[in-house]
Image: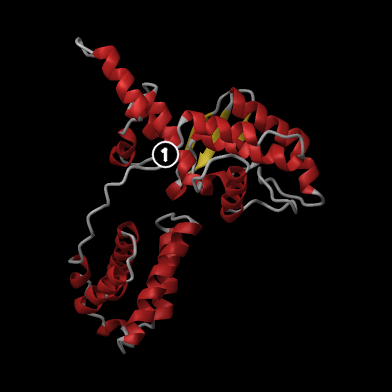
Amino acid sequence: MRISQHEALQQFITYIQLEKNYSALTSEAYQQDLQEFFSFLKQEQVTTLEEVEYVHARLFVTQLYNEEKARATISRKISSIRSFFRFLNREFQLNDASFQSLYHPKKESRLPRFFYEEELKMLFEANEGETPKEKRELAILELLYATGIRVSELTSIQLKDVDFSLSILRVMGKGRKERYVPFGQFAHEALQLYVTDARPILMKKQQHDSLFVNMRGEPLTARGVRYILNEMVKKTELTTTIYPHMIRHTFATHLLNQGADLRTVQELLGHASLSSTQVYTHVTKEHLRNTYMNAHPRA
């Protein structure tokens, strides 16, 4: 049975959304990866999916290396192609054996970037304020650091997901997996101030239950969060570029440095595998030195 690239892609996206419970962001990433692969096939004058062979996939990967794409990006695109052709094999009996032979590049052994406690203190202090906008931004920063949630999880929070009496946040993670994450006093105060004083003003005439909103009262997007965080850094003497996952890295690093066990951090981060959490087992130089000085008999 012959099927067009467009129709196959649409059926695949429907499959990963409905049956695999992939988020909208993940589905969009798969779609972009596969559309990029289709564009490459067009350049190679391959017009049908039945014509695609292992050599085409290898040439595509080679092109990605030539474009100096990050290894993680290349690995994700390989996964997208493999999953797509596995789906075609299941649904349309298209041979996918060649694509299972594609190997992933070795991961770069870079440690996650994070803030030291002094840097984070500067960030908090520089962004205190009394306007609705400032109260919203501080609440976002406090909640990200207090919980380590992903930016996609932050923007999907509804008012009903926040339990102020227990200081617990209901989070819908990857694969529509639900978890509950506690937050501390600083986040509690900043969040309550935002909800009672700032959000009603920012909402204007909008009617929805999204916790965080933009200056027009509409639900805040992931792009909006990235912009807000970068504007917050500009108010400090820090020279780093901030991104939402950097706060997540900081959350995990600080917990582990203070003695939290790996399984607890895994649960808080919503990682399906412990190996995903182990990347955070690096420690700061100060923590390493202090532990050594306190523990070694001849230090």
Residue 59 or 120: which is nearer the viewer? 120
- The residue at the point 20 percent across, 10 percent down is 297
Can residue 289 be spotted in the picture?
Answer: yes
- Residue 36 against residue 45 in the figure, above or below: above
Question: In the figure, residue 93 lies in which quadrant?
Answer: bottom left
- Residue 124 against residue 213 in the figure, above or below: above
Secondary structure at badge 1 equals loop
In the displayed structure image, the side of residue 147 where residue 129 appears, left or right:
right
Badge 1 crowding class, 10 Å Cα cut-off, few under 14, some 14 to 19, many 20 or more, is many
Q: Check disc 1 and report the residue beneath it.
A: 270
The amino acid pointed to by label 1 is: Gly
Question: In the figure, residue 103 lies in which quadrant?
Answer: bottom left
Q: Position of residue 53 (x, y in %)?
A: 22, 79
Question: In the figure, residue 274 lies in which quadrant?
Answer: top left
- Residue 87 against residue 264 in the figure, above or below: below
Q: How is the image coloured?
A: secondary structure
- The residue at the point 30 percent across, 86 percent down is 44
The image quadrant where one finds the N terminus is bottom left
- Residue 150 against residue 91 in the figure, above or below: above
